[in-house]
Image: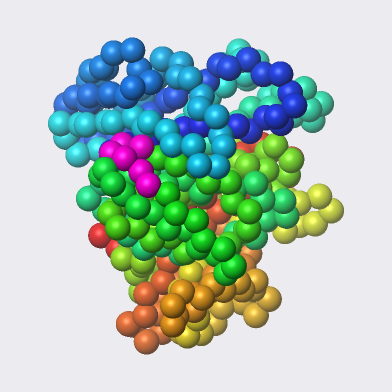
């Protein structure tokens, strides 16, 4: 599998030392194995041992690429001897030594700590056709990241008024600065991985997160998932309150053909009537994204008829803290 992380979360007019670590968390069920890590950005091939459970791998500092629409980048290849789940994020070195000052410096706006988790799925689960959902942000600064595994991969990105095409080589990816908040239609001649990288989701320079975008083949007719609680970890307060309200910034986004929306049940009830709906026309079909606020804990979504498939992304962020989260509700395997 390939990945690359290049998050320019600091304002462009600020002088910032380039000091980013890339950290991967590999989770394995087998007793012991190994992983080989290769990239043109690394000076040498890395060989690491994998243990049962969680293995944390910290790579040498990598150069950041310029985050410009149309720039093609090299990814990082990870090949493991045993089945693993892979999670990645980057961490700013200059912030690391001041992490204990986090609570103080957040409110003084002296320090900005950004740790964006990156999700991966195996290459054999990639897709060819995607609807990038509308995400309900106040001030979105989203990047559409498309990763290719095969040479001569041709990608088409379409909104309701414009389209753009790109060609990618084996192991490369492209970041496209989104000029609309969606939905978008993405099509390719070869399997690709598509994800959304969001900066400033609910607050300036904060709440960044990444979420994979399920392909149409990943859609399911039933989902069981958990929306994170407020204090799920001592270092992260997810889904905290908006100023002056008691509402939480937890949101569910459902994407489906327009005629399927009314067939979907949320916790065995109709979808909330105050939901936000956005649509895109693709040929003779219309796809819609419906987004609404969610409560913490366990939820279900399913097709009432039992035959209609749809995609789900859950996301949330805080005003008073720096962290956001986003993830698919599940993928059809």
Picture quarter with the C terminus:
bottom left
Please name the residue shown 22% across and 26% down the image: 35
x 39%, y 54%: residue: 155
Query: x and y percent of residue 142 in the render?
Result: 59, 48
Q: Quadrant of residue 183?
A: bottom right
Q: At which x and y percent is residue 62? A: 45, 19
Residue range in magenta is 167-172
Decide: is 203 above or below 82. below
**Residue shown at 51% from the left, 76% from the top:** 281
Q: Is residue 257 above or below residue 110?
A: below
How does the figure colour the protein chain or chains?
rainbow
Residue 132: where, in percent of width, then height? 49, 60
Residue 220 against residue 65 in the figure, above or below:
below
Whether residue 138 appears in this view of the structure is: yes
Q: Number of marks in the image?
A: 0
Between 150 and 39, the one lying in front of the other is 150
Q: Looking at the image, can residue 267 be seen?
A: no
Query: Would you place residue 26 above or below residue 46 in this image?
Result: below
Between 187 and 48, the residue placed more toward the observer is 187
The reply, left or right, for residue 220 in relation to residue 297 is left
Quarter-of-image position of residue 306: bottom left
- Give the residue displayed 35% in from the left and 52% down from the top: 154
Q: Is residue 83 left or right of residue 175?
A: left
Q: Which quarter of the rendering shows the N terminus?
A: top left
For residue 295: magenta? no
Q: Is residue 165 left or right of residue 36?
A: right
Residue 16 spot, x, y in % from top left: 67, 18
């Amino acid at each position: 599998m390939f990945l690359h992380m290049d998050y320019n979360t600091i304002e462009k007019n600020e002088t910032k030392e380039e000091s980013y670590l890339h950290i991967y968390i590999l989770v394995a069920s087998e007793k012991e194995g190994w992983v080989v890590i290769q990239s043109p950005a690394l000076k040498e091939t890395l060989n690491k041992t994998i243990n049962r459970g969680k293995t944390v791998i910290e790579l040498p500092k990598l150069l950041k690429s310029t985050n410009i629409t149309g720039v093609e980048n090299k990814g990082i290849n990870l090949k493991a001897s045993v089945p693993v789940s892979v999670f990645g994020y980057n961490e700013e070195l200059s912030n690391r030594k001041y992490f204990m000052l986090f609570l103080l410096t957040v409110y003084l706006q002296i320090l900005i700590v950004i740790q964006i988790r990156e999700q991966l799925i195996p290459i054999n689960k990639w897709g060819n056709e995607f609807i990038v959902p509308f995400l309900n942000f106040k001030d979105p600064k989203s990047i559409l990241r498309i990763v290719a595994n095969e040479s001569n991969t041709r990608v088409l990105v379409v909104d309701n008024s414009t389209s753009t095409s790109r060609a990618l080589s084996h192991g490369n990816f492209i970041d496209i600065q989104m000029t609309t908040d969606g939905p978008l239609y993405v099509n390719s001649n070869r399997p690709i991985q598509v994800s959304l990288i969001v900066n400033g989701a609910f607050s300036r320079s904060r709440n960044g997160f990444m979420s994979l975008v399920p392909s149409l083949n990943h859609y399911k007719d039933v989902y069981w998932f958990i929306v994170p609680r407020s204090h799920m970890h001592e270092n992260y307060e997810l889904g905290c309150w908006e100023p002056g309200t008691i509402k939480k910034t937890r949101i569910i986004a459902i994407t489906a053909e327009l005629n399927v929306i009314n067939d979907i049940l949320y916790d065995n009830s109709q979808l909330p009537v105050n939901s936000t709906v956005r649509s895109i026309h693709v040929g003779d079909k219309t796809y819609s994204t419906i987004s609404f606020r969610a409560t913490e804990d366990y939820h279900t979504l399913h097709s009432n008829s039992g035959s209609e498939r749809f995609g789900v992304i859950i996301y949330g962020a805080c005003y008073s803290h720096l962290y956001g989260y986003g993830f698919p509700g599940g993928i059809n395997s």
